[in-house]
Image (cartoon, coloured by chain):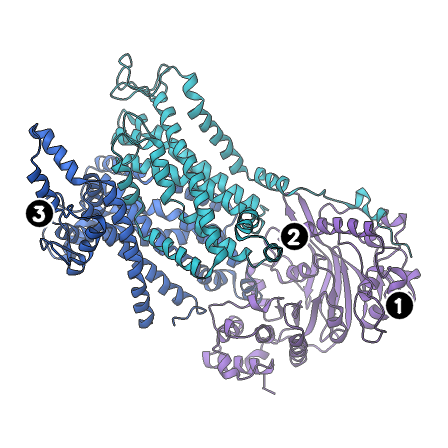
Chain colours: A cyan, B purple, C blue
Amino acid sequence: MSNTAAPRLDAEAITSKERGQWELVFRRFFRHRAAVVSLVIFVVVVLFAYVGPFLWKWDYKIHSEIPSWAAPSLAHPFGTDKAGRDMLGAMMQATKQSLNVALVVAIGSTVIGALYGAVAGFYRGWVDSVLMRFLDIMFVIPFLVITGALAGAIDTSVRWYHMAIILAVFGWTSIARAVRAEVLSLREKEFIEAARSAGGSDWHIITKHLIPNTMSVIIVSATLQIAFAILSETTLSFLGLGIQSPDTSLGLLIDAAGASAFNEHWYLFYIPGVMIILIALTINFIGDGMRDAMDPRQTMVRR
Amino acid sequence: MANISVSTSDKGRATGTKGDTVLAVKDLAVGFPTDDGLVNAVRGVSYELRRGQSLGIVGESGSGKSVTSMAIMGLLPKTAQITGSAKLEGEELLGLGDAELSRIRGKKISMIFQDPLTSLNPVYTVGYQLAEAIRTHYSDISKSEARARCIDLLDSVGIPNPQQRVDAYPHELSGGMRQRVVIAIAMANNPDVIIADEPTTALDVTVQAQVLEALEKAREEVNAALILITHDLGVIAGHTDEVLVMYAGRPVEHGSVDEIFYQPRMPYTLGLIGSLPRMDESRDQRLTPIHGTPPSMLNLAPGCPFRARCPMHQDICAEVEPDLLPINGSGHVAACHFSDQLEGKAPDDVFAPVATDLSVEAEVEAMDAEGAAAADEEDK
Amino acid sequence: MVVFIIRRTLMMIPVLLGATILCFALVDLSNDPVQDRVFEIEQSTGEPVPQSTIDALEASWYYDRSVPERYWIWLTGLGDTNDDIGLLQGKWGPSIEGSAMDIGTEISSRFWITLRLVLFATIASIGIAILAGVVSAVKQYSRTDYTLTFLGFLFLAMPIFWLGSLFKEGAVQLNKILGSTVFQTYGSGTTGFQGNGWAVFVDSLPYLIVPTLVLMLGGYAAISRYQRASMLEVMNSDYVRLARAKGVRNGTVMRRHALRTALIPVATFAPLALSGAMGGAMVTESIFGWRGLGVYSLDAINAGDTFAVMAYVLISGVVVLIGVLISDILYGVLDPRIRYE
């Protein structure tokens, strides 16, 4: 009896067309409304920080012709501070410095954490034990104290890249744990066995097989790391242990605003605060959307 | 044999002799709204179950066999759109609220799930979970009475040392033992209907037979009607009177075990039988596979859903979805335009034993991938 | 159980040793209080500092030795000392602020102030997190769920220092409106208040409310997200379905089966919440003018006071490790599959 399959593949029989993995990821991501809105807002914030300074006439420095403590107006949409600084210009610079730190920390800590976690999970045994004990030690060390002590020790003014390096060096532990857990489950899979029996070196297996397959965990962690870095950097700067004047950061601006939340200089307090929240909030939503999009196990189909 | 008819458990037991209809399902349909549209998981299932009778429901994963039972039990998520009717002793089950359903569930109709490893709550002892089933419906029963009944029940499903096992946590028991506990829970209140959803799929082959035996015994003791859901025709053959074959959310054939196994009138049933290894055939006889996978239940095209995999399909199959039509007077029904032509056909008369053409394989694989995606969607 | 606790306590020692070694090395190498002090003196007197003064400073702060030697002497107090150093002998080492600011005295007076805040905030944030997570999961995809989820994200994104400043000023405004000081917004208790432990505690309550609220809101969101996910997973589990199939009412199933089991993974979050609250305490204390450990550590960092920083590191480490121990015990209590060997 004939068994030709051609008629089976009639277009009408196929109800949904095949999609590539990344296409599927994008489709799922763009279905997450909060994540898409967040992405748009985040892009606007990035443009504000990096392109804004080229379009706006004032920079973040003090100028004698700027009146002190002017309320928001057309000339100074975000107002001015006591010393005579245009807050819109200052916000652009502050946001830029905070984003600089955040992006470098996200990349740096992700690289350290992913490699660390992959090595620990791959070798297991005593290597894993030693590496995990070190993670325990890192967990016990108070993060703000150690990063603050190091930042405070930099003699001349602390620049954003100092902060970025310090935060990245101490901020990778959560990624290491996440990647290790993923690798521990992956290494039992057949394709790792296959790569090993084909004679692949450990380094080859880690970088070519394990890390690519933990990519979804890594990308999501890296995204959330941006929020973590923004909050850490601004906190340290607020406490006087981060970026120093005359440069500026969102944390410094809030510190300078002091107790003005309910007086006539409210804008000095709320504008940088809302900016931090905006960045961290949109990043968290984007991370959430990416997790939904890339990790089908966690997908919660909205019904 | 332990005496399981503790007085309390006979309370509220409906009287009736073997042969009355206990469960009547009519035109049951279930849809799940998703982002891509409505997934029609079940598209019209009807059957009647008589007291003491056992019905097997067979089908591939995603054919809607589990969803049908879950809909009857009221265990589907709130978003599921359920239409039709399911009457237990004349009482409509669909649309009942949580309070009314809770009164019926576990008492008149109970269910056994597929995976014994995840069916029991890890933080409570099996005795607690078994007693909970009894005390939920008979709140006046004392703790010691409930415990005694639990031990009896555990004994009757063949758990050794029930006095000790009653205090064990699920993780201290093997998979087979845990499934026996689940069976004991199902029979705890002498239900009228027990629905067993792939009760042995997750178990070792050696344990499967024992668990089925325990299930069979439980059913006889409480004289319940049984619905046995499975994809394993071997399980069906020994344990049910009637068989309902489901495909793409619909019954495609329904008849007695003998009719289904020896006179199947739907190519899909024939294919299922052909893919079953048999002891009574010569060793060199190859199995007959059915190529491809079930269609996506999303935006199902008109016509017979099996046609893409059916070697006998004709033009009419793409246009008209065949109804369940009687084969003879005995109640055997099949949904195929060409049932008559299947009379006396063996599986390898219809399905080629091996796919010779590599391109066929490739195309089949492509369809597999799509089918798997569809099945995934439906599992959610 | 006792054996388990003893064993886990012993296992903390190497972790604490490792943490102090690492911190000591980093903090010590990154600053030089002798040089700072010399610079200060030169600034104020305008004259070069004689070598003898420098030598005396170095000797009194043990800066005449190498870093490993200094760590060893800080830890054990063995060797040539001024009898003011040696952790194992109960001496915290000299503070560069002088003997009036003895580290041991400072820490013991500040410890309870900070612990009070941290414990209240941790317990409150875990409680709120469980509540919000469970409500969110039970009402999945409802308006309540979306609102709670959004609020969670919002507090997750809110820096504690900003929230703290806002709440502090808000409380001041509220006091003005109410016409009486309901919320104390500066200090951790009435200045100069004397009394027994309970009286001190009662006195501190009005001071505690707003900072605790700030720390709680800063810490609950992450746990509540986790609680929601854990609850959802359990709600979709086979055993919850079986419980419903047994005829148990929905509300009872949620309480008895879903919540009970969903609490297990949340036990892991206790130490994380605790260490987060310790960090948050540094910020809240400095905003609300508390004389607690957090502020002490900040001052020590700014002054480059290595031994004082180390004292904070050690105490915070012990608190976090006790949190880990409690979470391990809780885990065993909640999950019968875990056995203490």
Mark 3, mark 1: which one is toward the viewer?
A: 3
Is disc 3 placed on a helix, strand or loop? helix
The chain that hosts pointer 3 is: C
The chain that hosts pointer 2 is: B
Q: Residue at x 46, y 37 (%)?
A: A283
Q: Residues within 10 Å of mark 3 (few under 14, many from 20)?
A: few
Q: Residue at x 25, y 46 (%)?
A: C209
Left or right, B54 with reference to A125: right
Quadrant in which the N terminus of chain B is drawn: bottom right
Residue A203, x across and y down, in percent: 52, 50
Left or right, B37 with reference to B144: right
Q: What residue is shown with label 3?
A: C99
Q: Residues within 10 Å of mark 1 (few under 14, many from 20)?
A: few
Q: Residue at x 88, y 52 (%)?
A: B313
The chain that hosts pointer 1 is: B
In contact (CB < 8 Å): disc 2 and disc 1:
no
- Outermost residue to the bottom: B1
Depth check, front residue: A123 or C244: A123
Vertically, is B145 above or below A8? below
Depth check, front residue: A57 or C303: C303
Q: Are marks 2 and 1 on the same chain?
A: yes
Mark identifier at residue B329:
1
Vertically, is B177 above or below A225? below
Q: CA distance from mark 2 to mark 1?
A: 40 Å
* Res. C341 image quadrant: bottom left
Residue B255, x across and y down, in percent: 82, 68
Vertically, is B19 above or below A7? below
Q: CA distance from mark 3 to mark 2?
A: 70 Å
Vertically, is C213 above or below B87? above
Residue B318, x across and y down, in percent: 85, 47
Q: Disc 1 marks which amino acid?
A: Gly
